[in-house]
Amino acid sequence: MRVIAGKLKSRQLKSVDSKLTRPTTDKNKENLFNMIGPYFQGGTCLDLFAGSGGLGIEAISRGMDQLYSVDKQYRAFLTVKDNVKALKIEDVVHIYKMDYWKALLKFAQENICFDLVLLDPPYSMKVHQKILDFLVENHMLNDDCIIVIEDLKEEAIDVKEPFILKKQQIYGITSLQILIYKENKS
């Protein structure tokens, strides 16, 4: 695994030594960022089920200012820490070893708002809509926030306001949905 583009391009990343995480391939990562960017003019990213941290680190490499990286698995947490330290980006990456729900509650309490949200939980968790509802209800999304949802294709969510489906791509058994958050202006 490596960083595909941006200021950290071609730098190697460690993967998680565990069967509990499923790494995003370099090809899928490149496709994903070509769909959503491919580059950013600053902003804050949330990688809620971080694994090795590869997606969030890619967002930092491509121009995001801050990354909140969360994973409850100890090996994943250590891998993210190692990758961030090796890349010398500790000053812009906040790493948490905690359950996704506790992390969301913490970030809501701290009034943190996001410009990019990466949701790639273990398959079949069925938590996407719950997470989206929480983010909206707690005013944690900046207008035009991009939300990336990866899950089994049969678990793809029905997109409704205040979100707009920008793109949906099927890769084998996997669905990749790109949503845009639009604040209600009325």
Image (cartoon, rainbow, N blue to C red):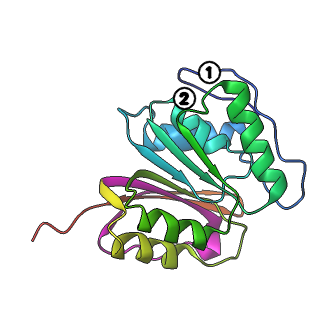
Q: Position of residue 61 (x, y in %)?
A: 54, 29
* Side of 149 where 173 appears, left or right: right
**In front here: 30 or 43?**
43
Seen as rendered, the residue at the extreme front is: 110
The residue to which callout 1 is attached is 9
Q: Which residue is mark 2?
A: 61
Secondary element at image label 1: loop
Label at residue 29: none
Residue 49 picture location, percent across and down: 65, 59
Residue 154: % across, % down: 63, 75
The quarter of the picture where the C terminus appears is bottom left
Q: Secondary structure at mark 2?
A: helix
Choose between 25 and 173: the one closer to the eye.
25
Where does the magenta region start and end? 144-167
Is the C-beta separation of discs 1 and 2 under 8 Å? yes
Residue found 57% across the figure and 25% down from its top: 5
Counting residues from the start of the chain, the first of labels 1 and 2 encountered is: 1
In front: 91, or 154?
A: 91
Badge 1: residue crowd in 10 Å (few <14, some 14–19, many ≥20): few
145 left or right, relative to 170: left
Q: Is residue 150 magenta?
A: yes
Total tally of numbered discs in the picture: 2
Give the image quarter of residue 147: bottom left
